Image (tube, rainbow, N blue to C red):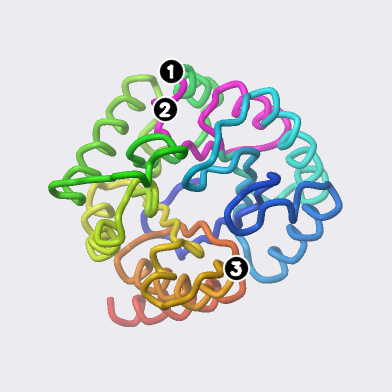
């Protein structure tokens, strides 16, 4: 499913939570979730990422049982209504991942890269399931209190390589692994900018890269806006830059704008190469 040389894929964010930073409470009913999936499909989404726990800065952890109650009915409904649409489950807990896979999800998106739950890699390996490994510093509750790096690009690359090695040791096949530098997860503005300027180095690790900048607060500080939904254009700019750097997957709220940005950048990249 993951491909280093494919056209850019958009992963649409579907938070079935009451408290996500940008869309909390909008899609936590089945009807609302399915309407949003229909809209995303019309606008060109490739994958839908379903999450039952907010990981915004300052958020509290949600139990596996609560996450399962939130995500499994939605995953089942999406799979039944749109069987050709790949679904990823955004969780750090193996019980949630296992329940979602049984309900129809086909990808695990783990922001802890297997560190929050030692059984996560075993679940992925047993199900021959693609998994996305992200870097974060600290837990969401406190990760923005005082993040620090001496060399953020080196530190994040080293961490991701270690988690790749751990996943391979656990029996996950190399072609089922993707990585995510974790923009905004325990990072200062300058860290996020350094990572975005160095995306080609993460591509150079030899695994597909997922970029998640959608409506992130650090861009608001640059653009002098406070509302997340005012950052659609800013997000699309990072998508275009990511395509040119070799990133193949983009986790976004706003499909239409990012589809246009990704497709134009991809056409330019293909002409250039």
Question: Under tag 3, what secondary structure?
Answer: loop
Say if the magenta span includes residue 137.
no
Q: Eyeballing the image, is 89 above or below 215?
A: above
In the rendered view, does 112 fall on the left or right side of 50? left
Circle 3 packing at 10 Å, graded few (<14), some (14-19), many (20+), is many
In the rendered view, does 227 fall on the left or right side of 223? right
Of 75 and 177, the residue lying toward us? 75
Q: CA distance from mark 3 to mark 1?
A: 33 Å
Verify CB contact (< 8 Å) between mark 3 and mark 1: no
Verify CB contact (< 8 Å) between mark 1 and mark 2: yes
According to the picture, the residue beneath numbered tag 3 turns out to be 254
What residue is shown at x 32% (from left), y 71% (from top)? 244
Range drawn in magenta: 91-117
Circle 2 packing at 10 Å, graded few (<14), some (14-19), many (20+), is many
According to the picture, the residue beneath numbered tag 2 turns out to be 114
**In which image quadrant can residue 67 be found?**
top right
Task: Give the mark nearer the N terminus: 3 vs 1.
Answer: 1
Q: Eyeballing the image, is 25 above or below 71?
A: below
Q: CA distance from mark 1 to mark 2?
A: 6 Å
Verify CB contact (< 8 Å) between mark 2 and mark 3: no
Residue 19 percent location from the top left of the image: 64, 47
Task: Give the mark nearer the N terminus: 2 vs 3.
Answer: 2
**In which image quadrant can residue 41 be found?**
bottom right
What residue is shown at x 45% (from left), y 39% (from top)? 140
Residue 73 percent location from the top left of the image: 79, 36
């Amino acid at each position: 499913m993951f491909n280093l040389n494919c056209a850019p894929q958009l992963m649409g964010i579907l938070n079935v939570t009451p408290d996500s930073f940008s869309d909390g409470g909008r899609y936590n009913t089945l009807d609302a979730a399915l309407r949003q999936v229909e809209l995303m499909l019309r606008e060109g989404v490739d994958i839908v990422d379903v999450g039952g726990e907010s990981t915004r800065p300052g958020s509290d952890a949600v139990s596996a049982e609560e996450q399962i109650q939130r995500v499994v009915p939605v995953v089942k409904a999406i799979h039944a209504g749109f069987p050709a649409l790949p679904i990823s489950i955004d969780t750090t807990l193996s019980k949630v991942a296992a329940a979602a896979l049984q309900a129809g999800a086909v990808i695990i998106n783990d922001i802890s890269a297997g560190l929050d739950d030692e059984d996560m890699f075993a679940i992925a390996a047993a199900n021959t399931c693609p998994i996305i490994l992200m870097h974060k510093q600290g837990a969401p509750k406190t990760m923005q209190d005082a993040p620090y790096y001496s060399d953020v690009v080196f530190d994040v690359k080293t961490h991701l390589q270690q988690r790749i090695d751990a996943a391979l040791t656990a029996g996950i096949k190399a072609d089922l692994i993707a990585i995510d530098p974790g923009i905004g997860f325990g990072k200062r503005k300058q860290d996020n900018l350094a990572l975005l300027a160095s995306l080609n180095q993460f591509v150079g690790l030899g695994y597909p890269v997922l970029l998640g900048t959608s409506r992130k607060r650090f861009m608001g500080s640059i653009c002098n806006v406070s509302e997340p939904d005012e950052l659609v254009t800013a997000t699309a700019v990072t998508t275009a830059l990511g395509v040119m750097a070799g990133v193949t997957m983009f986790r976004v709220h706003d499909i239409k704008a990012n589809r246009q940005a990704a497709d134009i950048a991809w056409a330019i990249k293909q002409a250039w190469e």
